[in-house]
Image (cartoon, rainbow, N blue to C red):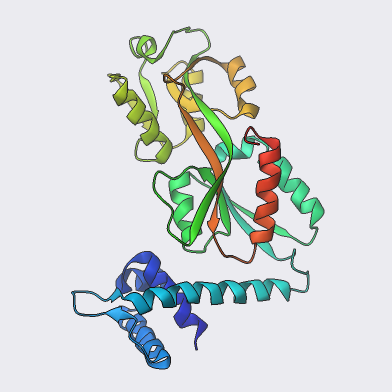
Amino acid sequence: MSLRALRTLTLIARKGSFAAAAGHLHLTQSAVSLQMKNLEEELGVELFDRTGRSPRLNAAGRLAVERAEEILALMDSLRADLDPAGAVGGVLVLGVIPTALTGPVPRVLARLKERHPQLQLRIRSGISDRLAPLVEDGELDAALISEPPYAPPPHCQWRPYDEEPFYVVGPRHVPARDERDLSEQLPFVRFDKTAWTGALVEGQLMARGVRPPDVMELDSLEAVLSLVEQGLGFGIAPFNAARLGAARQRFSLRPFGEPQLKRRIGLYERRRHPRRGLTDQLLEELVGECLLK
């Protein structure tokens, strides 16, 4: 049985179609279809219902996907265990949102590296909604991201380790009671409202009946804060404990929302992957460092 075919099967389940899986694998749809036909012949059972416009997994196919994920996770784990550097060698590929890199994460990663000298760390920075699909597709071992606004797919899980309260952020010399006051004085510098954090803020603004008239929209929280610091507008941003003290020195801050809006930060990963022991250690250390005990 081809491991390649099993990986293709699990990818079809995640992407939802032969065409999407083929595009991800840089193959033709006919090549993916042939792989699945060969796999069905080897297993002696049809895995897809082909009566509609496009093949859909049937009950046997869904069971085969579950077993394929178990087999692939075991093979990946075996490769890690047979690595000359040992089970704690090799590479941990981790996605991290930029704000988390200013908190305890670098310190915890340094301790993990000290504990496992043969381990190589590869860090990919990005916003939560761009890192999550990379975890789901197996391109990242795990990611430190904000809480997904949807239920993770069955093969993934998200576990929290910290909370970040939101604040209305104004220039240091412009005191204000809340976002209504500031919106009368300054343009609103918004974080991308299609991103998870931006959508969270937008929902709260709508619930409070606040419609800032002038808006600048950016895809980086740090860029938002840079413009606010120069007096070009006001923003709404989350701060972890490590960042909050410094932010009070740079900005005029007021809690946002009643009760104050918060986002949770956690570890997102597939339920089975060869670096699960390391990510469990990482999460345990982060919980010990942060607010969630």
Question: With respect to residue 173, does 10 lie above or below?
Answer: below
Name the residue nearer the viewer: 58 or 174.
58
Which residue is pictured at 36% across the width and 80% down the height?
32
Left or right? Give the position of 97 relative to 29: right
- x and y percent of residue 245 in the render? 64, 20
Which residue is pictured at 64% across the width and 60% down the height?
276
Name the residue nearer the viewer: 144 or 156.
156
- x and y percent of residue 202 in the render? 34, 30
Which residue is pictured at 30% across the width and 79% down the height?
48
Question: With respect to residue 102, does 179 lie above or below?
Answer: above
Question: With respect to residue 65, does 286 lie above or below?
Answer: above
Looking at the rendering, in which quadrant would you find the C terminus? top right
- x and y percent of residue 236 in the render? 44, 24
Q: Is residue 38 visible in this depiction of the protein?
A: yes
- x and y percent of residue 114 in the render? 81, 51
Q: Is residue 27 visible in this depiction of the protein?
A: no
Left or right? Give the position of 269 relative to 45: right
